Image (cartoon, rainbow, N blue to C red):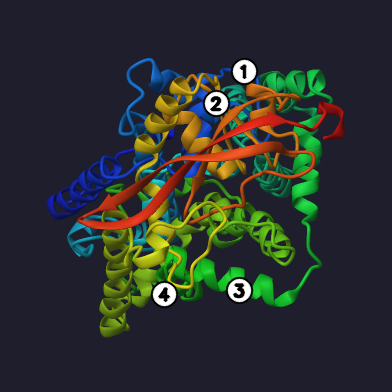
Amino acid sequence: MFLNQSIQLKPLEKGVFLIIVLVHFALAMSFHLSPDEAHYALYANHLDWSYYDHPPMVGWVQWLMSQVSETDLVMRLVPMFCWVLSAYLSMVLYQKFQVKYAVQNDVSAENILDQLPKIRSILILWMTSPLLNLLSIALVPDCLLMPLVAALMLLTWEMVNSKNVPTIQQWVGLGILLGFCGLSKYTAIFFAMSAAGVLFKVHGLKLVREKGFWLALGIAFVMITPVLYWNFKHEWISFIYQFGHASGSQTWQLHKSIIYSLVLFFAFGPLLIIGLIFNKQVKNPNSVLKTFTKQSNRTEFSEKLGSASLTDSLFSWIFALPTFLILVILAGRGSALPHWIAPAWVALIPLAALGLDRWRPLKKKWWVGVVSFQVASCMAMAGLLLTAGFGSEVEESAISLAGEKPVSAKPNPFADLIGWDQAAEKAVELADLNHVDTLAVMNWTLASRIAWYARPMAVKVIQSHHDQFDLWFGPMHPGDDVLWVDWSLMTFDPPVRDQQFESCEQLEQMPIKRMGRQIAHFNFLLCRNWQRNNLSR
């Protein structure tokens, strides 16, 4: 199908792309797993049909990797592969858009490779987007959805750019892709609706009379039955959680949606927005159109393209817009993160690349400036990741106890990626010395790293709201003693009060250093006699 398409990269393109991949490898070995990464790595250690907050695919693929090794690098190979595959599939779709546009404008495709820039726009979009590069080393469900959405768009494009109705093989492929999407993330429903919308727009309601249509639905349904089965066994808690999360905990405010949109602009880079703005397809037989094809028989070529009236612009926006609008609206309630929109951004990259092809010759200085800005942003992000941010803990902030927030303490989100293996090792050691068999933290963002690096030791969450950690390790029980771990950059008062522990005793403090400076520290406390009854949760 589309995996055997010929994508020809120039030597410079191959070299730069390889350098970017090697940079991803270097970064992957330089710091520990983030909260989300560790959480999904724990999925692999607790293999199941599905999970509290996401479908199971992210855990299944990490389980396969864990059979090779459980090192940080190996657990990051999947997102690296997804990034490369997504870029490849985007280029294939970009090629198909170029081919159709060339035919519509009666442009010869012979020797067109000689007219291409040294590095094509679509590769630059992938290699200079800060957040897409970050997702190349940090596995979240959206990483899996990115290549799946690109593949879904490619297959759908083939199914609508034909004079005939789709073949059985295409319907089977569609069902499998939709099934994998459904196993990856719940937001896949929007992309399934987009694919249906495109197919019905072009082929009409006659599709419901096609056996292949129902075959695709059946395949997709069978593939997502593990999610349905797990939720049925757990009183539909995953669906309830998702609906509650989507509704948000705050009143909707317009300025929050605007801020979210601005964050997306800089997180993915302004090049994509510029490309979309300049993607106006003015028919001009004399324009230089960049395409990969060497097909010279235009009549035969036109027959292959079919007679569908769906433009590449409308096609791309049908896939991207539903997810984009939903997340921007949810952001108004404070319940959307930038990386959630990555699959929708991937749907727009081939379209934006066409616009950049038109913009580059017109605004060469602006082109160089914007590309330089995005490259500098990526380099700055990599530098902050490697150095664990800027600043350090000094004076009273360097020795603060749990719950203390000195004036000299400064926020440093990049320190979040360093020292968790040391803290987990020390926590297990102290727990053994004090004859307790459970570690505890205040919330799940702390629990995921401690649980991953201290595995298989149980880690319980004190501020639990009946989440995935309760399912894995169970709730606290009356009389429980734990080794409580507190991190200085997200510190909490010791949990000593009614309905919590009877007492907490400071045992030790561990500084975390990076490049000669202290960036954070951990406090370890022995907390005794949990006093809340399970039913009071």
Compute the Cα span from label 1 to label 4.
56 Å
Is residue 104 shown left or right of residue 168?
left
The residue at 40%/25% (across/down) is: 429
Residue ID for mark 1:
48
Q: What amino acid type should be assigned to the residue bearing mark 1?
A: Asp
Horizontal placement of 70 versus 274: left or right?
Answer: left
Distance of label 3 from label 4 (alpha carbons): 39 Å
Q: Are marks 1 and 2 in contact (CB under 8 Å)?
A: yes
Q: Is residue 70 left or right of residue 490?
A: left
Front residue of 320 and 421: 421
Counting residues from the N terminus, which is met first, the one under dot 1 or under dot 4? 1
The first of marks 3 and 2 along the sequence is 2
Q: How busy is the neighbourhood of tag 1: few (under 14 within 10 Å), some, or many (20 plus)?
A: some
Q: Name the mark on residue 43.
A: 2
Please tell me the numbered disc located at residue 259: 3
Residue position for label 4: 284
| N-terminal-most mark, 3 or 1 | 1
Is residue 493 visible in the rendered structure shown here? yes
- Please say if the residues under marks 3 and 2 sit with CB atoms less than 8 Å apart: no
Q: Secondary structure at mark 2?
A: helix
User: What is the three-letter code of the residue carrying label 2?
Assistant: Tyr
